[in-house]
Amino acid sequence: MEMSLKVLLSSGRTLKQGIGVETGKNSLEYLKETAVIMLNKEDATSLGVKDGDLVTVKTDVGEITVSCKIDDKLPKGMAFMPYGPWINMLVRENTEGTGIARFKSIEAEVRKGGEKIPSLEDLAKILKG
């Protein structure tokens, strides 16, 4: 049976996320900074993953493969993804009248592995159906 970890996923801005303004959102640098999930070291160890390993994140909206980064500042059971196209694949379009998608406290499941991190072009194809 495949090991998975249930987490509360939140998203927000990061200092390095702004690299997209400098290098462009099609750059490898932007992908490396935004196509990631940050996990507590204990949670990552329980999944058998380390920095740079691929993981698949799944919510009731969808799933996406991203890179794992260890962040000891995160409490156990919490995960963080920077704002960007990859987190957008996991959140609801319906804003429930607020005009803002829900990017905090999303129930998610993380499992080790995945084929590859999808490019922006791959994500556009998925969205077009």
Image (cartoon, rainbow, N blue to C red):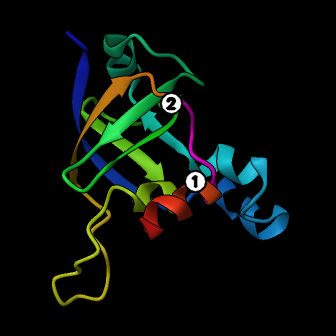
Q: Residues within 10 Å of mark 2 (few under 14, many from 20)?
A: many
Quarter of image, res 109: top left
Q: Residue at x 24, y 22 (%)?
A: 4
Q: How many marks?
A: 2
- Looking at the rendered image, the disc whose residue lies closer to the viewer, 2 or 1, is 1
Per the image, the residue denoted by label 2 is 68
Residue 126 or 55: which is nearer the viewer? 126
Quarter of image, res 44: top left
Per the image, the residue denoted by label 1 is 122
At label 1, the amino acid type is Asp
| Disc number for residue 19 | none
Residue 124: percent from left, percent from top: 55, 64
Residue 41 or 5: which is nearer the viewer? 5
Q: What is the CA distance from the residue labelled 2 to the residue labelled 1? A: 20 Å
Q: Residues within 10 Å of mark 1 (few under 14, many from 20)?
A: few
Quadrant housing the N terminus: top left
Residue 47: percent from left, percent from top: 34, 15
Q: Is residue 118 magenta?
A: yes
Residue 94 or 82: which is nearer the viewer? 94
Q: Residue at x 40, y 10 (%)?
A: 48
Q: Is residue 20 visible?
A: yes
Q: Residue 78, relative to residue 17: is it above or below? A: above
Q: Is residue 123 magenta?
A: no
Quadrant housing the C terminus: bottom left
Q: In the displayed structure, does residue 4 sit left or right of residue 73? A: left
Which residues lie in the magenta part? 115-120
